[in-house]
Image (cartoon, rainbow, N blue to C red):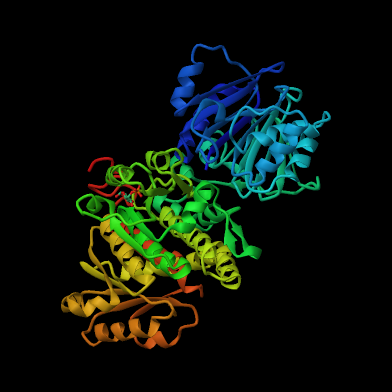
Amino acid sequence: MCGIVGYIGDNNALDIGIKGLRRLEYRGYDSAGLAIHNGNSVDCIKSVGKVDDLAQKIKDKDLKGNSIILHSRWATHGGVVEKNAHPHTDCKGNIFIVHNGIVENYKEIRAKLTSLGHKFVSETDSEVISHLIEHFYEGNLEEAVIKALKYIKGTYGLVVMSKDNPDRIVAARMFSPLVISVNEHGGFVASDPSAIISHSKRMIFLEDGEVAVIKKDDFIITDLESRVKDKQETELDWDIEEAQKGGYPHFMIKEIMEQSESVANSMRGRLIIEEGISKLGGIDSVKDKLKEIKKINILACGTSYYAGLIGEYLMEELAGIPTEVDFASEFRYRKFPTVADEAYLFISQSGETADSLAALKEIKKREALALGIVNVVGASIARETDAGVYNHAGPEIGVASTKAFTSQVVVLALMALFLGRQRNLSLADGKNIANDIAKLPILIQETLKNIKDIELLAKKYSGASNFLFVGRKYSYPVAMEGALKLKEISYIHSEGYSSGEMKHGPIALIDENFPTFAICPKDSVYEKTLSNIQEIKARNGKVIAITTMGNEEIKSLVDDVIYIPEVNEVLSPILSVIPVQVFAYYMAVSFGYNPDMPRNLAKSVTVE
Ligand code: G6P
């Protein structure tokens, strides 16, 4: 998830661009760059680090111009080095592009263009776009952009500038957001309104497959067949801070709401449904070793640890590989005897958690394979593991992890599918799982439709000082994660327990003031969890059930029901966790707490 800004007009383009880019820094801050057009030539300047580093680099340069494109990068393909920063250009220095998204078929395009004589300077997928546009360019910029886009598989929020066309910039969208505004101050384009809202509150949100030609006092939007589209402006009444949060009051709820998109990004280009398998480029180099793996040890902290617990069920069920999960913070105090052909899998959103890194250092002393599932590209854990998979969930700003969790579970499912198909998982079963994974973004959207009802539930239960969360099998880690979410942002004491263990202790706590969340989708252990719910009800405990749509019988047993769509049991945590995230969020908000900055907690815990 990168930040993009573009401007064309008579005002100070550099100033408008840099100020806009600063407001998008929350989308990525690995490197920043700009291309500015002065009517005759284009200056392109890039820098590793934040927008401040770029601003420092240009401060003594006399950069003037009437149009500018800028980019703040969240690395996906290629390390965090200057040559990988945007804008990217073509061989002649005529076309400049900034891109947010992933070009899935970039290797193929790059090979083809290289054979035609194009020279590439970066390791990025994005650079193929500038060369592809160059390939098709015959004097009409928008025509060349459209021709190039027809070859691109993947996602893009794209803004293009050309030395030969100083009067326009061209923007295009496919799954990565872009908004434009043209008014008396000029033409603007950005990844989200926060970058340009100080110049205009009237915005046009581009849709997938739309291309905009933006001039200083005019614009035209077409589809990829060059048919003109009639678009309505939207008047926003957001301030800048609200705009950065996409109009939501907090990053946490924004991140909860974007899980359909982040999960889609985590699986994009990674599923080969007809072969019932996943394709994970980051572990390709160790695939022969993976075939021999007899045991997996998952190490992680916090929410990533709970994702790991789901990973244990997935690896054992789909791949038949014995799997053990431990807190990275505890692992180092155990003897943890080495066994032959084992792998260690580190899960970390930040890739910088001190305890996880310390455990990784221990592992490196052994001859075991170290793998990572990391969201932040280039983070220490990603660099120090032998191989791994990036989440591509985009930056997570809210301290309480939400979209990283669902993305981690998706990546674990993809990995388990891959390892399973290397072993005994049949083609038919592999196809079923792959199909079910592919449906998740739609099912997440369905799940999120309940949000208003959950807000009301949070109000209803806001008088409770304690909560119990229970679940069995795949829902057990969700119960643990639900309790963690509630305690970390609303400071309500909550315990996550396995439904089966409840009768060995926590049930003693139950009375009419101690409500329970029962995570009980209609899965292979549903009946058993139902019995546990009955035990709670027999002790006057209130129960909120999260169950599968169509389950009417449960209504007469529990106090409140939250429905999630029907889904393969092995993927159910990705849906059932969403209501508990939303509940915790609204609980915190109802007490007036800021869920983005809970007391005593930090996003990335770099101390032991
Ligand atoms: C902190 C964060 C949690 C996160 C945990 C592990 O406690 O507040 O949201 O789950 O660290 O972080 P990691 O970056 O390793 O996933």
Name the foreground residue: 454 vs 544.
Answer: 544
At which x and y percent is residue 156?
A: 63, 44
Is residue 250 visible to the viewer in this orientation of the structure? no
Residue lying at the far right in this picture: please name it: 138
Residue located 53% across and 69% down the image: 425
Q: In the rendered image, which quarter is residue 584 located in?
A: bottom left
Direction from residue 248 to residue 146 in the image, left or right: right
Name the foreground residue: 309 vs 350.
Answer: 309
The correct choice, above or below, for 216 with respect to 410 in the image is above
At which x and y percent is residue 136?
A: 80, 34
The correct choice, above or below, for 94 with respect to 549 in the image is above
At which x and y percent is residue 72?
A: 52, 33
Is residue 286 visible to the viewer in this orientation of the structure? yes
At which x and y percent is residue 226?
A: 80, 45
Direction from residue 54 to residue 577 in the image, left or right: left
Count of residue discs: 0
Residue lying at the far front in this picture: please name it: 340
- Give the quarter of the figure containing the C terminus: top left
Direction from residue 239 to residue 98 in the image, left or right: right
Q: In the rendered image, which quarter is residue 452 located in?
A: bottom left
